[in-house]
Amino acid sequence: MRQSILFLVCLMILVSGCSLKTTSPSSQDEAFVTSIKEQNERFESLSQNENFDELLSLFRQNCAAPLSKKVYANVCEQALHVNDAKAFFKNSFELKKIQPNEQRSMLTGYYEPLLHGSMKKSARFKYPVYAKPKDLLMIVGENDKKMRGRSVKGKMMPYYTREEISKRKLNAEVLCYVDDKIDLFFMEVQGSGRVELEDGKVIFIGYADANGHQYKSLGREMMNRGIFASVEEISLQSIRAWLVAHPTQIDALLNTNPSYVFFRRMDQKATGSLGLVLTPERSVAVDRSFIPLGSLLAVKSHSANYSVDKFVFAQDTGGAIKGPNRADMFMGYGERAQWIAGELKAPLEVWIMQPKF
């Protein structure tokens, strides 16, 4: 449940994709066909470093979500009675490689940030973390497309933009106040976070809704303005450093993204669109037009800062995650997670584990 809105490309949005309307990729679809030999070779390659007992435990947890059961109805039941975890995954699934379309294949990362805040507004803590506004409405249009807005004299109008929200008092609960508008912006991009209050208490914040305006990339905007010369220069760290060094330009740049995220208090740490607590380096955000939520995937990616070749679960979505070969990997909480997520941008290959029965 995040605008996931996840990480670097959540800041860039360089890709887009067309929609595949099936509930899950068909084994007859040419884009997903993989030979038996290729499947066996890929599975054995994944097996070299995989902890199948751990994977089975995570698979059972994944099956707790209704959407996962829809994808894996029979195997979810079978998973409850497994003695040999490796044999279960090898014999119950087919590995189908997802072929890239015209869009760029890429792995990025996101994490759970820590902000500092207070339940009361003050000179330091002055930036509100809003809950979903009471006047934010949602209607379902053609093709089940959800549209958000507000009612003005009986007419549906667009909801306030980021800039408009910054200049008015919303009809919404303030969950808390934080001391850094840049960190608050990045928490919107991540879709969730933790806020440490003045008394040391930590509260969990999760995605509740958004204002309905299209997400526009801050990193792309800064590159268009000549602040960055290339995509390779853009990262969470480089964007934040530039904004801190140019405080008078922060508002103007942040407001180029009209999208705004509203939050809710959570009883648990970072939770994805599937409704499950995210597992570091096992949960990914995907484009559900191509990959059903709850799917078990195999991903392979390599960069100078991070390499991965393992099974993961499609448990989240993101406004910047578009296309069949795009994934945003949840890195967890802490400095390492933040650093990797902020820098990660690497080519990606994706396989989906389809049930054999």
Image (cartoon, rainbow, N blue to C red):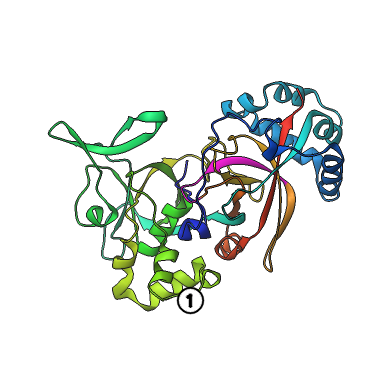
Badge 1 marks a residue whose secondary structure is loop
Displayed quadrant of residue 343:
bottom right
Q: Which residue is mark 1?
A: 229
In the figure, 265 relative to 238: above or below?
above
Towards the viewer: 230 or 112: 230
Which residue: 55% across, 64% down?
Answer: 342
Towards the viewer: 22 or 286: 22
The x and y percentages for residue 177 are 32, 55
The x and y percentages for residue 156 are 22, 35
Which residue: 75% across, 24% down?
Answer: 80
Q: Does the magenta segment cover residue 319?
A: yes
Instruction: Give the prevailing secondary structure in the magenta stretch.
Output: strand
Q: Is residue 180 visible?
A: no
Which residue: 25% across, 43% down?
Answer: 158
Q: Quadrant of the C terminus?
A: top right
Q: Residues in magenta?
A: 311-320
- Residue at the left extreme, as displayed: 153
Q: Quick check: 191 left or right of 311?
A: left
Q: Quick check: 147 left or right of 70?
A: left
In the figure, 42 relative to 104: above or below?
above
Q: Please, what is the three-letter code of the amino acid marked with disc 1?
A: Ala
The x and y percentages for residue 246 are 35, 77
